[in-house]
Image (tube, grey):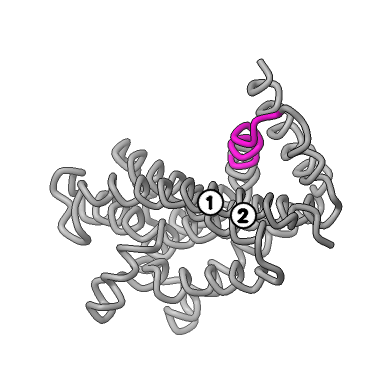
Amino acid sequence: MTFARGFAAEVRKGLLNLAAGWRENLIQMITFPLFYLLIVLFMGRGQLRADLLLPVLLGMVALTFIHEQVNRVFWSYLGDIQSGVLEQTYLTPLPSAASILGRQVAAVISALPTALAVLATGATAITLQGGRMPFDAQVIVPLAAIVLGTCGLALILCGLTLVFRRIEIVTQLSVAVYAIAGGTLVPLAAMPDPVAALSRLLVPIAPGIEAMRDILLGGHSLATLPTGWGLGWLLTQPLLITAAGVLLFNRLEHLARRRGTLGRP
């Protein structure tokens, strides 16, 4: 019961923060779709080319989600550290796992409106260009892989902020890396092999984006994905990232408690 109440309280707190910041969320739901359209215009040399709208849309939705999810859970930890709330939480009987899981779920939910706004904009643009927004139920698998892998990455970054100061720049730089080398805008198959391999290995959204493009653009099934490292890696990579996130967060959490950095200014 303590775990369930703590988990529910963290989810509720995250959703209250989402509602309280509705103006900021509204701005993001406008600016991210505009950014998507500007990217397509830039890549299409001033035209919303039909052959670019869908491939870029799949990458942009994933990039928007990882940006929003990681930043929301990261800043929730940093804010609680700086205000002293997190240190007080660790003095209660509440299991830290309840707080961690609740923050992750709240961040995932909070990231959806902006990602869905980008998706709706892309679908509208594709329709206006005379195209059709494809759908295949198989994309649920790569979408779930993206969500799970992103949660693992968030755990790694949040664990680092428990111990190190001025870690904010790492979060911002990581999003820039995903945008440039994560296969979000340019397919990994068009990148140098070492870069593509590192992205498939380390970037949580890369295998999922490749799989969605194969399914929606190429008409392939999950069992016959022609690009990337196949279905096995699509399922394994997010599990490995999440396991690494859990282990690293646990180690850094114990280190922070020993050093007393949970309540640093």
Residue 206: x %, y % from top left: 36, 61
Q: In this view, does 226 lie to the left or right of 95?
A: left
Cα distance between the residues tagged 2 and 1: 6 Å
127 or 20: nearer the eye? 20
Q: Helix or strand or loop: what does disc 2 sit on? A: helix
Residue density around tag 1, few if under 14, some if 14–19, many if 20 or more, within 10 Å? few
Q: Helix or strand or loop: what does disc 1 sit on? A: helix
Main SS of the magenta segment?
helix
Q: Is residue 95 highlighted in magenta?
A: yes
Q: Which residue is outermost to the bottom? A: 45
Residue 258: x %, y % from top left: 67, 52
Q: Is residue 194 left or right of residue 1?
A: left
Circles 2 and 1, Cβ within 8 Å, touching? The answer is: yes
- Give the magenta range: 94-104
Q: Residue at x 51, y 52 (%)?
A: 119
Q: Which residue is outermost to the front? A: 258
Q: In which quarter of the image is the C terminus?
A: bottom right
Q: Residue at x 33, y 40 (%)?
A: 141
Q: Quadrant of residue 91?
A: top right
Label 2: which residue?
255
Residue density around tag 2, few if under 14, some if 14–19, many if 20 or more, within 10 Å? some
Label 1: which residue?
251
Q: In this view, does 46 lie to the left or right of 82?
A: left
Residue type indicated by callout 1: Arg
Q: Which residue is drawn at 25% across and 78% down?
A: 194
